Amino acid sequence: MNRAFHIIMWGTACLLIGGFVVLIASMLLELGQESFVRPPHLREISFAVKLSLITSTIASFFAVLISVPVAYLFSRHTFFGKNFFDTLLDLPIVLSPIALGAMLLIFFNTPLGRQIDQRLGPFVFEVKGIILAQFLVVVGLSIRLLKATFEGIDVEYENLARILGYDKMRVFFKVVLPMAGKGLIAAFLLVWARAIGEFGATITLAGATTMKTETIPVAIYLGFESADITHALVYITILIFISLAILYFLRTSKVLHRE
Amino acid sequence: MNNVHLKIETMSTAIGGFSLRNISLSCERGEYHVLLGPTGSGKTSLMKCILGFHKIQRGAIYLGNRDITHERPERRRMAYVPQNYSLFPHLNVEGNIRFGLGAGNVPVHEADLLINRLCEMLHIENLRHRKVRNLSGGERQKVALARALAVQPEIILLDEPFSSIDEGAKRGLWVELKQIVNEVGITAFHITHNLEEAYSLGERLSVLMNGELLQSGAKRDIFESPLTEGVARYLGYRNIFSGVQKRHPEGTEIDMGYFSVFVPGEKPETTEIKLCIRPQDIKIIREGLPIGDFLNRNIFSGEITSLLLFPEYCSMQFRIEASPEDYDFEIRIPRYIQERYDLYAGKKIRVGLWEPKIILFSPSLVSER
């Protein structure tokens, strides 16, 4: 029975990993064989990569920044309707990004949305829209990750700091944030990787305009739309390498794993 | 009364499904006070109330002349050593000790002097630059103590500070902790469920059970004269009997039905009473030798029904002749006595109850509160 158990475990893992490897290998093979119908210009690639990295970094920064107080509140306090609000904040994790994008688009058609669009925007079919769409998609994930981080910090540390003379605000900055440091970095990296790959909400709110709102996922979409598979494959390869690099760093970084 | 440092007056509060009821205790300046109670009795909750982390619903807490009932924790001028020490993992040993000084804006040179003195006193100079994760249990405790004392508090509260220390190292650390607290001259309020720890460290004790403070007083009074059956059982009194008082020319006789015990002096005028004696206060009578004054009126013949040997002592069960029970007394004797008297299960012996240690519970306190 032990042998059978090991075969099931190893066999399943090998099948799944093999599947991923085959997917990536077949894509790279295809990329090597294809003759470029319209080889993407370096300038185009550079634009899409830069736009993706800039928008996702800004969106992730704001997502983590806003998640910190929200996640801390939910990890430390009990209040009326907490479960409902907690569930509401989870919605972006499970909701289809296209639906989120559509909701944003509808919101900017309301009087309040138009006011916000005029004062802080424009968002619709603009780069700011990409940031907003990415922010909305990843903020739920960010809250979830940081809530787990804060819950992992024993409240006793905070109690102790207060007894030693620190008020709540100083306890947060002197004890909670330094102790949550690795969790914050890890949450930012995961959220960033997710934001780089965001497509559904982005295309719904910001559209797919070449050299304007063309993030890497949008470039992939545009490549397929114009039946230029090779064009899309270049961007897919870039996206895979960026995502793998972030995830591998998360898993192996000494900074994040040192006790 | 002016010397009272920490005073809790008729405090009551509910925390979740648990409640602390009508707690009153006082702790004198410079005293080492131990709050003793089994797990789940509410010791930590009471400490959290004193520290200001649980709001109290009734009563008041005073520290010296200050009413601190509604004072914020950071303004109470207390120090706290939690159960697992909670040393900040992002700071090294010195950073941990220095931490509290940052809140009070103590000048750097003064802070340095204070830290030097504390490190010297606690013998942790060599640990100053170590990461806290590399410290042993005893070293962690000393760093936590140094961190607490660094803020020069009015009182130090210790929550089961030896719970994560190896059994073998505990006793040495009890002595060290007591010496340090005495040297600093600070009032200490220590909670534990360990009887030996409480006896070794405490000058005065309070016993908390099921959210109620059952007894508070000098260590000797608590251990030798428990007021209730619950306290007695918790303190290791195993031989507890219900009996009826009868007159005796020289004192009182407590009749348990199939045996009776003599107790000197007059007892409360009640009929029903409970009697108890600790296992170590029942002595083996050596045949052929004169019997001491405090044993000779309560001697029982019978048989050892079982005998368990432990590294430091021997525990036996003893049945009085003609008793309907499986056994009547639980007796604890040193190992050398067992060997010298050649005691074994089935052997017929005589035992005597050490008169001064026989305890009677007055009827109002007989039942568990």
Image (tube, grey):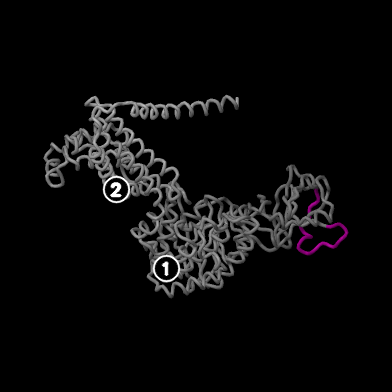
Residue ID for mark 1: B101
Q: Quadrant of residue A99?
A: top left
In the picture, measured across the screen, residue B39 lies left or right of residue B338, that is: left
Residue B108 counted in the magenta span = no
Residue B294 counted in the magenta span = yes
Q: What subunit carries mark 2?
A: A
Relative vertical location of residue B239 with respect to residue A11 in this rendering, above or below: below
Residue drawn where x is 39% and y is 64% of the image: A165
Q: Main secondary structure of the magenta part?
A: loop
Q: Quadrant of residue B73?
A: bottom left
In the picture, measured across the screen, residue A123 lies left or right of residue B82, that is: left
Count how many numbered circles sit on residues in the image. Answer: 2
B49 vs A235, nearest the viewer: A235
Amino acid at the residue labelled 2: Phe
In the picture, measured across the screen, residue A27 lies left or right of residue B265, that is: left
Q: Position of residue B325 (x, y in %)?
A: 73, 43
**Alpha carbon separation for disc pair 2 and 1:** 33 Å
The kind of secondary structure element at disc 2 is: helix
Query: How crowded is the residue under tag 2: few (<14 C-alpha within 10 Å), some, or many (20+)?
Result: some
Query: How crowded is the residue under tag 1: few (<14 C-alpha within 10 Å), some, or many (20+)?
Result: many
Amino acid at the residue labelled 1: Leu
The magenta stretch is B286-302
Q: Quadrant of residue B98?
A: bottom left
Q: Position of residue A157 (x, y in %)?
A: 44, 56
B301 vs A22, nearest the viewer: A22
Q: What subunit carries mark 1?
A: B
In the picture, measured across the screen, residue A113 lies left or right of residue B317, that is: left
Q: Is residue B153 visible?
A: no
Residue ID for mark 2: A61
Q: Position of residue A221 (x, y in %)?
A: 25, 30
Q: Position of residue B128 (x, y in %)?
A: 51, 65
